[in-house]
Amino acid sequence: MTDIFTSKLSKSYEDVLAVDSLDLRINGEIYGLLGPNGSGKTTTVSMLTTLLSPSSGSAQICGHDVTTEPKAVRKCISYVPQYMAVDIRLTGRENIDFYAKLYGIRDKTERKRRVNYALDIMDLNERADDLTKTYSGGMQRRLELAQALTHQPKVLFLDEPTVGLDVIARKMIWEHISNLKKSGITIFVTTHQMEEAERYCDRVGILKKGVVIKEGTPSYLKSALKSIITIKSDGKMPNILPDNVDFIGNENGSVVYASDNGADILPSLIKKYDEAGIHVYSSMVRDPTLEDIYLMSVGTEAADTEQFNRAQIRRIIMKG
Amino acid sequence: MYRFATYVWRDTIRWKRAPLNVLSTLVMPATWLIFMGLVMPVKYDNYLDFVTPGILVLTMLTSSLGAGSSIMFDKTLGYLNKFLALPSPRESILIGKIVFITIRGLLQSTVILIISILIGATIYPISTYIGMYLLLTLFGISISALGTTVALYLDNHDSYAAFQAFVSMPLYFASTALISLDEMPTALRYIAEFNPLTYAIDGLRDIAKGIIPTFSICFLIILAILIMIICSWKFRSITIG
């Protein structure tokens, strides 16, 4: 049985197609859904977690259909939304106990055992009886993961799990997520953090305007590109590029190009700069990263979807 | 359905641990009572006895409308989405909210009843108080369900606050809280006769006189059932859509 299975899953809002014919097969892995704002990530997660009903197509979680058996789906999943929502006037332990009760664990001893286990796994034991408002962002996120673990889910949905956290807290969260996978949980995560996705996800899908345009292991996706050239100049780029060189985007004030063979092509590229009268400060050839693949796939027009995203979020909030 | 009690537990702890909230919910109605009961010019034998039901219902009204802002908080801060993805029955979120808010309103009512006795209101037999609590519970359920329904339709706190202000004061002044129906200007009386607050307040006054207010009770039961039906329908439609 596939833990997450979707077939032609689509969602439209009025005249906008937010998610378009999504086909996913996810099992026993960390799957990262990447995409710019408004590409349909949150809509996808909302449909898979039974918060939104699909306009067409179907989705099954642990073999249960999200539309016809939503309760069975909710029994085998846990969902941690993007914006942190822990009760700050409750202690860490109370926050987890609250969820354990809602998950229907009525036996007191069993509940205590599960709560302690969740606290243990997320390294929250020492501060378990402090009010959550004294927790750091990273600890609050870990507390949310602990809440999600009390009913031993088969599938865990995480919407932007490291947003707003510092580097150390991010690393810690991802290490916990990796450990959860080892214990047999399938993890579906949406993220903007390419380097995190590259490092921790087994497979990623790149979503653009509701369509998965690339899918595979990070190394497989990267193998499509041979090398990356970055050139720092006085800000402009030549109108004419050598053959086999593609413009990808901008990165820290440098222009980024992709090419099959960067080292060989670099001199001719610099020559184009010279011909255009642009001064090159520095140039570099390196191996591609997932971020390069992402930028190449979604393109620079991604920023245009900001307005749609806002409307979409508003709608989701209104819909509760 | 026992899980609604878990939501009640959560709201109670959150409320208890914010001392300022507790203080304001308890002191506010007491202030109203003292001002209205003692400061207003006395035309009645015991104006305090006349005005206490009005203050009780006003307190229940403001308190119960708080159910809407509470669910609005859960909605905008992301709690609601987390709750909706849980396997526990979704209606228990709604019932938990209404039960918590109604209990909190009854607590406030108790404070008012105690203070009213301390400053000179008549002490009734225990059965009268039981009747009063039953009526206030019915009223509390109706209004908190109404507040919740409206909050589910609106999308931010500002609009809900506007609704609250728009509804509570006119309803209050166009009721029999401060003045009886016979003494009202005709125009106001027409509004007051259709105002649920009037039924709750006059019902309480009848109970105090030892009369069972059958009509008020029926009216409030029907109102509570109607609003609960609309509320759960709306709740279902937003959570499945």
Image (cartoon, coloured by chain):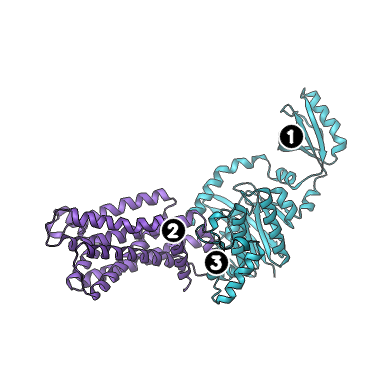
Task: Give coordinates of residue B96: x percent, y percent.
Answer: 43, 67
Mark 3–mark 1 distance (CA, rounded to whole Å)? 49 Å
Q: Which mark is residue A255?
A: 1
Left or right side of B191 for A79: right
Q: Is residue B134 above or below residue B112?
A: below
Q: Which residue is mark 2?
A: B71
Circle 1 — which element? strand
Task: Give coordinates of residue A245: x percent, y percent.
Answer: 80, 37
Residue at point 71%, 54% (across, down): A204
- Residue B33 figure quarter: bottom left
Q: Which mark is residue A99?
A: 3
Task: Give coordinates of residue B42: x percent, y percent.
Answer: 13, 56
Q: Which mark is residue B94?
A: none
Name of the residue lying farthest toward the top:
A277
Task: Give coordinates of residue A155: x percent, y percent.
Answer: 65, 65
Left or right side of A206 for A134: left
Residue at point 66%, 59% (across, down): A188
Residue at point 46%, 67% (across, down): B9
Disc 3 + disc 1, Cβ < 8 Å? no
**Residue type at numbered disc 1:** Val
Circle 3 — which element? helix
Asked if badges 3 and 2 are on one and the same chain, I answer no
**Closer to the eye: label 2 or 1:** 2
Q: Colour of chain B?
A: purple
Q: Is residue A48 visible?
A: no
Q: Is residue B60 visible?
A: yes
Name the N-terminal-most of marks 3 and 1: 3
Q: Is residue A139 above or below residue B6?
A: above
Residue at point 56%, 47% (across, down): A309
The cyan-coloured chain is labelled: A
**Closer to the eye: label 3 or 2:** 3
**Residue type at numbered disc 2:** Ile
